[in-house]
Amino acid sequence: HGATSLVAFARQALRISAREAKARVCAAQAAGPRVGLTGQPLPPVYERVAAAQAAGDISPAHARIVVQTLDALPDPVAAELGHTVEALLVTQARRLDPDILAHHAHDLAHALDQDGMLHDAAARDRRRHLSLSLRTDGSAHLDAELTAEAAEHLRTLLDTLARPKPAVEGSQDPRSAGQRRHDALLDALKMLERSAQLPDAGGLTTTVILTADATDWAKSTGTVTTGHGVTLATETAKTWVDGETRVLGLALDRFKAVQAYTNCSRVFTEHQRLQLIARDKGCSFPGCDAPPLQTQSHHLTEHGAGGPTSINNGCLLCAYHHRHFQRMGWQGVMINNIPHWIPPHWIDPQRRPQRNWMHDRATSGNPRSEPSRV
């Protein structure tokens, strides 16, 4: 049938959702009859579950709870008590609804954990998983069970990237701890993409793809489609694009044929970024101490507004200030070939440009290095 997997085949043949198809395949693997390599019939993995379900004594929801509880047991416990646990839970499933059965199953698993066997490294490794539940607007809910190694790497990453940003003119970082951790994970993913160490995807460098009508993109109207088929507002999509993102603009006609395309000149080259690092030494926003490896290249005059991808129009910004400087009312300018930032009126009514001295303290306070006017 040309299906890429049994789940895909079940979804196509039965016209059911991917989630339902996966649940049915998992149920069949746990409680369905099997065939050996030489063709001999084999009993189901969980015979009591299969027999109760075939007799109509328990529902698929009951069976799923029993199987999930048994699969979560560590190997020593499963080898010694697996059949007993299965028999007990199937007996309870014949008289309890799935919600109450789930509580009993949880209590039983806890009772078997008196010596902490469920928390050994082998059991944790077997139970590791990560799932991404997508919403219609493209956002998602992330759920994961991490091994100690994965958790340690993640905590190390968050220790570095999820710290509160330093106060700017008395204004503290407005993000909650959870928001900072979210932004830290986003920043880390972007850094990994820029590192060019990811495997190719279909022969191409791993790239986030945004497709839009050329007129809509220029005017920030209409919608954009991502490479995964998510539709979002063009104005929102443009905030995703920074000076180091590969962007290929396509102009399509009504038959979806390519009429024109752009190159990737928006992206700062490695040589240009090295020059930006040598000059800025980190985030150029006033008061920010983010080092170069935690920054992105930014066009002071937007590329879409005609700003060139050049050293004299570029600066380094950390991901936080790259996302929020416009919302906070700041404006970037180049003075004496050094990036400066003009604060909003509520910070300085005269809007005098400021330079970040966090990375260049040797010349801090030198009146010759401060601009007299914009």
Image (cartoon, grey):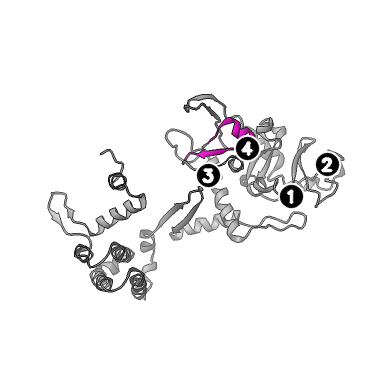
Residue contact at pointers 1 and 2, CB within 8 angstroms: no
Instruction: Name the secondary structure under disc 2.
Output: helix
Q: Which mark is residue 369?
A: 2
Residue, disc 1: 358
Q: Amino acid at mark 4?
A: Ser
Q: Nearer the viewer, residue 344 or 271?
A: 344
Q: Is residue 220 left or right of residue 48?
A: right
Q: Is residue 199 left or right of residue 223?
A: left
Dot 1, how many residues are within 10 Å of its Cα: few (below 14), some (14-19), or many (20+)? some
Q: Residue at coordinates 27% horizontally, 74% vertically from top-left? A: 95
Circle nearer the N terminus (4, 1): 4
Q: Residue at coordinates 80% horizontally, 35% vertically from top-left? A: 336
Residue 28 pos. (x, y %):
25, 55
Instruction: Name the secondary structure under disc 4.
Output: loop
Dot 4, how many residues are within 10 Å of its Cα: few (below 14), some (14-19), or many (20+)? some
Residue contact at pointers 2 and 3, CB within 8 angstroms: no
Dot 2, how many residues are within 10 Å of its Cα: few (below 14), some (14-19), or many (20+)? few
